[in-house]
Image (cartoon, rainbow, N blue to C red):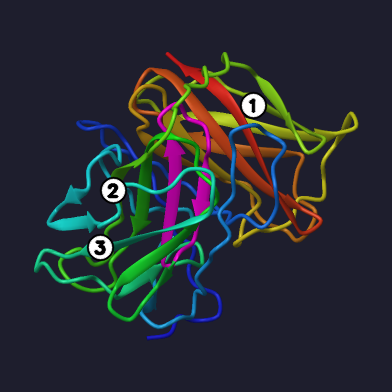
Amino acid sequence: MNASSRPTVRRRGLAAAGVAAALALTLAACGSSGGSSAMPGMDHGTTSSPATSPGASQTSGDMPGMDHMATGNGLSDTQDGYRLTSDDATLPAGKRAVYRFTVKGPDGKPVTDFAVDQTKRLHFYAIRSDLTGFQHIHPTMAADGTWSAGLAPLRAGSWRLFASFTPATGDGKGKDFVLSRTLTVPGNATKTPLPAPAGSTQVDGYTVTVKGEPMAGMAHPLTVSLAKDGKPVTDLQPYLDTYAHLTAFHEGDTAFAHLHPTTKVTGDHGGPDLTFHALLPTSGNWRLFLQFQTGGRLHTAALTLHVG
């Protein structure tokens, strides 16, 4: 089944157990990694899946600016009868590797028909337990429903791998899921301390500033501003139909949240300000990863945000 040339953009939000997320969010992009980052501890996957490949179904019927919200914090491999399975419990350290997994439905059979979300059928994330080594990948699926995610070299330690998807058929049709599994990379694992909360960071010559003071479990605006050489950035390019992608992970349990800008895409001149509606369900420190594109290159900036 083929998707149309421009699938409807749909988003995901996450909340912790017992908190229902209900945000109107728009225009999020999931950046696959085509470029490199100067930020330590951040890697980029390189494998992507075309939106028009077999098994992809275009999502439809969405009101502009509305998302289908997933509930939970992404820390389980099972939800509503859907299960993330894999035979890979370990992967080697220090070299590229492929992580293979399957999404099984309530009938126990592999799911092969997924709705297209942000031009992809499935979004895959890897994060080390100390919130370093962030990777955001768009894997490929074989005819039997087995997905293959090509990972950049992993450091020794414990990792959590997230799959974000929406079934196009079956009991879960139209519902967003984020499931995860843990993975061990053998070796001498040295923990990297989480950087202190800060209002700005730098990557590839860009200064990224985040303004806002979110409270746990409450919708709150965040503003991200970008500058280079002291001047506002106004050449942000659309990447997967939007200007930025913001992923957050909670310190201690690696709970996952996905935040989205409401800024309208108007060609290759986005910026300097992007407004996000954020719902971070748990208090404490969150590590934010912002992905944006200029001049055909993807940049990934990271900073720590404290949520009261």
Determine the CA span between mark 1 and mark 3. 35 Å
In this rendering, the answer to whether 201 lies above or below 178 is above
Farthest residue to the front: give it. Answer: 187
Query: Badge 3 is on which residue?
Result: 103
* C-alpha separation, residue under disc 3 versus residue under disc 2: 16 Å
- Residue 35 shows in this picture: yes
Q: Residues within 10 Å of mark 3 (few under 14, many from 20)?
A: many
Which of discs 1 and 3 lies nearer the camera? The answer is 3
In the displayed structure, would residue 306 be above or below residue 119? above
Kindly report which numbered mark, 3 or 2, lies closer to the viewer in this rendering: 2
Give the amino acid type for the residue marked by disc 3 in the picture.
Answer: Val
Q: Which residues are magenta?
A: 121-139
Secondary structure state at the residue bearing disc 1: strand
Give the quarter of the image for residue 103.
bottom left
Whether residue 61 is visible, yes or no, is no
Query: Percent position (x, y) of residue 252?
Result: 36, 22
Q: Return the residue nearer the eye: 109 or 244.
A: 109
Name the amino acid type tagged 2.
Answer: Ala
Q: CA distance from mark 2 to mark 1?
A: 37 Å
Nearest to N terminus: mark 2 or mark 1: 2
The quadrant of the rendering that contains the N terminus is bottom left
**Which dot marks residue 210?**
1
Q: Are marks 2 and 1 in contact (CB under 8 Å)?
A: no
Give the residue at mark 2: 89
